[in-house]
Image (cartoon, grey):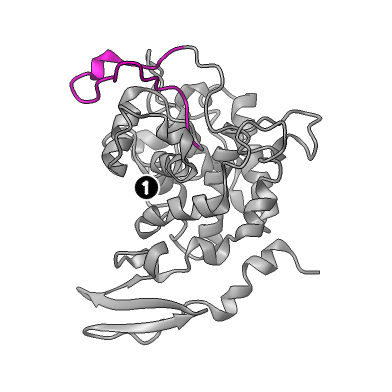
Amino acid sequence: METSSSRSYLKMGTAITMAVIAICGVCLVDADSKEIIVKTVNGKKVCDQGWECKGFSEYCCNQTISDLFQTYNFENLFPNRNSPVAHAVDFWTYRSFITAASIYEPLGFGTTGGPDMQMKEVAAFLGHVGCKTSCGYGVATGGPLAWGLCFNREMSPSQSYCDESYKSDYPCSPGADYYGRGAIPIFWNYNYGRLADTLKLDLLNHPEYVEQNATIAFQAAIWSWMTPLKKGQPSSHDAFVGNWKPTKNDTLSNRIPGFGITMNIMYGDSVCGQGNIDAMNNIISHYQYYMDLLGLNREKAGPHEALTCGEQIVFNPSTKSSSS
């Protein structure tokens, strides 16, 4: 029987083949009718795959996300996002995800390592997305894990999320509210400001752009995944794919590479350092469920101490302004 895994990896037989690399100049490789430009820079192979992985990066020499994660995978993960009871009908699309991801694929998002690691990172990232945008519940059709991308914004904001201590760098715009928006909701003026710096959009004056455009909504989430919260701390991406090397203090704090540390980075003590709580387990369940749907063995998620964060000391204890 053909599984989602076998379909996902059918392209391995026609995978990007780049055994011949020009010592100087550029060579072209045709893989599945995709033109891949390969060259060497300072003795290192770098590639450009056009719109999806552009800019001559070592990561663009790997398969891209759309090679491994296709429309049917997206539909399987988020089958109820356009249900009449959902709150963002006809908003989220596979195209918007791939378009958003294309900005970050040259930086390693979904393009680090081999196909297993690439798909694991996509599953991990979307596990956060699915959990944070879910309207599923215990007896929901298809089960509580099948209702990701039900929202694109916080439905009942409790405040405007304006922190005046950032007024010199990221001043709040009159009348603007910085409540949670996006595939992994971002909150607070300073996070909209940092995102605006990256995307070159006027999000401080127009935070509503994030809930009006699905590509921007995914870009905001991938930015959160790829960007360290503070200097000296890893991004969720680096911590997940193994680029981050824990210090002695990290080890003593039970912080190790894996999925668990991504929750520590993104949510701090609202999820982590509190033992075996539902808030943590729900995110993990989405990740494991998506691994199953993508044909990955959930045992590849790692041992308990790498998968969870209940015993980790958080990087950034709570203050009056939570970052997520």
Name the residue rendered at 58%, 60% in the picture.
69
Please tell me which residue lies in front, 118 or 152: 152
In the image, residue 17 above or below residue 322: below
The image shows residue 100 at horizontal and vertical percentages of: 44, 50
Q: Which residue, given by chain and number where applicable, does mark 1 sit on?
A: 244
The image shows residue 140 at horizontal and vertical percentages of: 78, 32
Q: Which residues fall within the magenta stretch?
A: 159-182
How many numbered discs sit on the rendered protein? 1
Name the residue rendered at 59%, 32% in the picture.
151
Please rate how many residues cluster around mark 1, counting C-alpha atoms within 10 Å: few if below 14, some from 14 to 19, many from 20.
some
Please state which amino acid type lies under the numbered disc 1.
Trp
Q: Quadrant of residue 176?
A: top left
Name the residue rendered at 67%, 33% in the picture.
86
In the image, residue 232 above or below residue 10: above
The image shows residue 261 at horizontal and vertical percentages of: 47, 38
Tell me the quadrant of the picture where the C terminus can be found: top left
